[in-house]
Image (spheres, coloured by chain):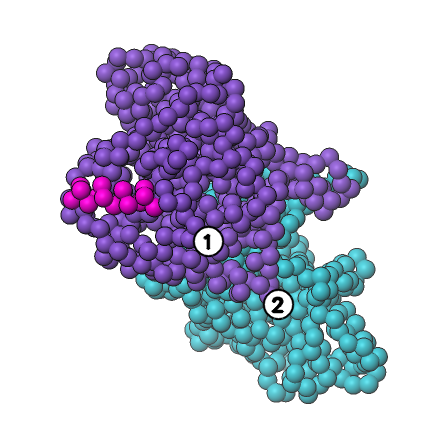
Chain colours: A purple, B cyan
Amino acid sequence: MSELTKKSLTEIANLIKKKEIKSEEVTQSFIKNIEKDKKLNSFITKCSELALKKAKDFDKKPKLNNLLPGIPIAVKDLFCTNGVKTTAGSKMLENFIPNYESTITNNLWNEGAFLLGKLNCDEYAMGSSNETSYFGNVMNPIAENTVPGGSSGGSASALTANLTPATIGTDTGGSIRQPASFTGTVGLKPTYGLCSRWGIVAFASSLDQAGPMTKSVEDCALMLEAMAGFDEKDSTSINKKKENYSKNLTDKIKGLKIGIPKEYRVEGMPKEIDKLWENGKKILKDSGAEIIDISLPNTKYALPAYYIVAPAEASSNLARYDGVKYGFRSSKGNNLIEMYENTRSEGFGDEVKRRILIGTYVLSSGYYDAYYLKAQKVRQLIKNDFDQAFKKVDTILTPSTPSSAFKIGEKKDDPISMYLNDIFTVPVNLAGIPAISIPAGHDNNKFPLGLQLIAKPLDEQKLLNIAFAVEKKINFKQMLNRWWEK
Amino acid sequence: MSEKSEKYLLSGEKSKWEVVIGLEVHAQVTSNSKLFSASSTKFGAEPNTQVSLIDSAFPGMLPVINEYCIQQAVKTGLGLNAKINSYSVFDRKNYFYADLPQGYQISQYKNPIVGEGEITLDLPNGSKKVGIERLHLEQDAGKSIHDLDPSSTFVDLNRSGVALMEIVSKPDLRSPDEVNAYVKKLRSIMRYLGTCDGNMQEGSLRADVNVSVRKEGDTKLGTRCEIKNVNSIKFMQMAIVYEAKRQVELLESGKSIDQETRLFDTKKNETRSMRSKEDAHDYRYFPDPDLLPLNLDKKLIEKIKKDLPELPDEKKERFIKEHSLTTYEANVLVSEKEISNYFEEVIKTSDKKLAKNWIMGDLFASLNEKNISISESPVTAKKMSQLIDSISSGVISGRTAKEVFEIMKETGEDPKKIIESKGLQQKSDPKELEKIIDKILLDNKDKAEQYKSGKDKLFGFFVGQVMKESGGKANPQLVNEILKKKLK
């Protein structure tokens, strides 16, 4: 493996800016790594030729003032990319080639980056282990037959294995933060509305948010800066000035108040995670922050509310995949209804069908008030909890997940236990606030564990600064033997 | 309606029945682009040429509200004397159909943009107020075409996403004639406002018709049936007549009415069951998470209110007051914006009474004859004005004017030119007329004597002779005056 691919995004960008390396060299190195991978299955589509051409074009006329000059980036296959297959991990879109570019990827390309490939993910981002993808399981580089988390599992896996210098995912209930935690990487879910949803295959519109997945907090700031911005094509986009997250990044967090919510100390949580959390508190205290115990009393209702709101929106969002206009269409059926039934039965996987069924049920007349409306009320209560908490503290510290990465197949047939994986990440999506997961240590199996920091809306800079300070003191090291190249 | 007017009642075998009707009118918002996308809304384009990625529901596409359509809905609400809701919500109405690309229609369910209002109908026996329940905005679907191929259905998405206003009336209508008056008035108001062109041939105005019947004197509403998507007033009336009779027959034979959705077959002139209440769609309405709730700025509403044009009711009152029209005449002249504009244009310079008579008489007859609208008439307001002025100033007689108009309505020629080229100007020179009269009196000495001795009826004979001699161009008034003098 080229040493170059081990470097952080910021380091590579600086080398290119200083003209010490060329984009082509960087791109070649990542392509080589991608070719050597035989087992991870993190890519659905590889764009090696296209990337090399873009790299050469860049080297001919380098624009060095951009944030991501000549950087090849692979992205989750939920972002529509002009002229490049976009599958959302589903048979339904197996051969779908958009003729448009998502706002987020377009923002990255405008900052000098170009597409390296499309990364595997759970089907329509529904899953916590990347086991629901039509294109097969993705493995976690930390150990064979271990899940990378999900739904942005391909992104986390590719990033960890140095197959891309940075990547982007989407997070509806933890789909960036949980895989980041499982792979020892950094993942940030921004404030709802900070990153445009235009051109991202929708799962649950009121919860979906794109965010960066990187090897360091510094890289995370750089990526977020490139991605974020108002988009008039997305009615839920926040109209505010762009921020210079990377330039303003600092580890000086003295005097900041950090909240520790008692409700996140769940039963049966491994001791190692408790230890990790304690260590996080100690580091923050040592850095001059003040630790304050807080309560988020409605936390326990978050997961059930989420599993009503998200499937409800999904059931409607996925109605457009009907075989009429684009994507998969079953050859069976004698009339429109039969064509619909066969197309959707054959085109969607089990988890997607499960959520469409749940969503259809909770929106049905007679059940709407008891489920959907009540879940929306719970959502408001959870938001209120956070609003109250942020009157007292600047940030909240929690573990990212209640366990480390698990074995492939271990939870596949137990949806409840699978859904419990998102217990610490889901409340943040319901409240529409930003949160980051950073690698914070290993468990007894040497599997990475993450800590989550949560902030109030649009407080990404503070979030990044605190994460930056913690990251420096924790000094997390990946322990990888690159088994997937053998 | 005034008390005197006769009630529309259906006579069954056993009793008399009252028909209760409510309409859900779907009016296409006049707007260059669609409700949530920038695609054109122009009628008659090649199939699927006015379709954006949003209209065809490609993955990741998001709706963005067209502000102009919002303003048009507010304007219409104000025109219907309705409450404008400063807070409204767009919901998703979920159902599968081949011409509904999203698998849901974006509509307004619990919180429409416009609440209760009222319009006044002008009926032969007086006026009647009809309540408006609500007005909400929604997307139109595309069009499925089943008859181009024996085994396939084609879909045209040009209409997909076009903005519609659904205007729901209260069940206040009682006869096919009232329905006619209601739809015409609604259409007229929207055309005055410029918010819907009301073109029924192009599908800009369609209605779902709710019909129920009850025994004369009952106050409780009967079970209703909804007749879907009727696209002309005539068909609405036919459907109501059929449906009401069907319901009366059922009830009188001891059966009950099933609440259901029905279709009107225009060829067989009958309604047929489409789906029963049990089979009714569960639309699973919920707020569209891609769109934030709509919060209207009070200032915007005030501004739209301030800029509202004069509407038919106000105009009618003004016409009666300013132009001494009867209620009937005023109703006719304000019924369409173009007609009232035409009238006002003509009377800017010309005599009001002549203008009214010519427009409602000869002009309307010619429009009917050619089946064209007033804006398509070759006789423009300006030319009509010239024609009327020629009468007022005595250049031509009323009778000659009719001759001139016959040419104008075919060729659209300028009346002055017609008069000149055909030499139709009246002879109004007294000396010239005197010469003619003297000649006639000389030629008919005997008759002149008879007249003078008391045979008054002969006066008409002399007039006729003079007119004949002058080729019909003699000014009749002058001829009268001179003749009377000479025959004294």
Q: What chain does mark 1 sit on?
A: A
Which residue is located at x 19 percent, y 37 percent? A251
* Marks 1 and 2, how far apart at CA: 45 Å
Q: Looking at the image, is B314 positioned above or below residue A61?
A: below
Is B375 included in the stretch rendered in magenta? Answer: no
Location of residue A342 by image quarter: top right
Is A282 included in the stretch rendered in magenta? Answer: yes
Q: Closer to the camera, A64 or B184?
A: A64
Which residue is located at x 50 percent, y 27 percent? A144
In the drawing, what numbered circle is on residue B23?
2
Instruction: Check if mark 1 and mark 2 are on a common chain.
Output: no
Residue extent of the magenta highlight: A274-288
Q: Is residue B274 left or right of residue A21?
A: right
Q: Position of residue A37 (x, y in %)?
A: 49, 19
Kind of residue at disc 2 = Leu
Q: Quadrant of the N terminus of chain A?
A: top left
Q: Let me know if residue A434 appears in the view.
A: no
Q: Let me know if residue B168 appears in the view.
A: yes
Label 1 packing within 10 angstroms: few (<14), some (14-19), many (20+): many
Residue to which mark 1 is pinned: A303
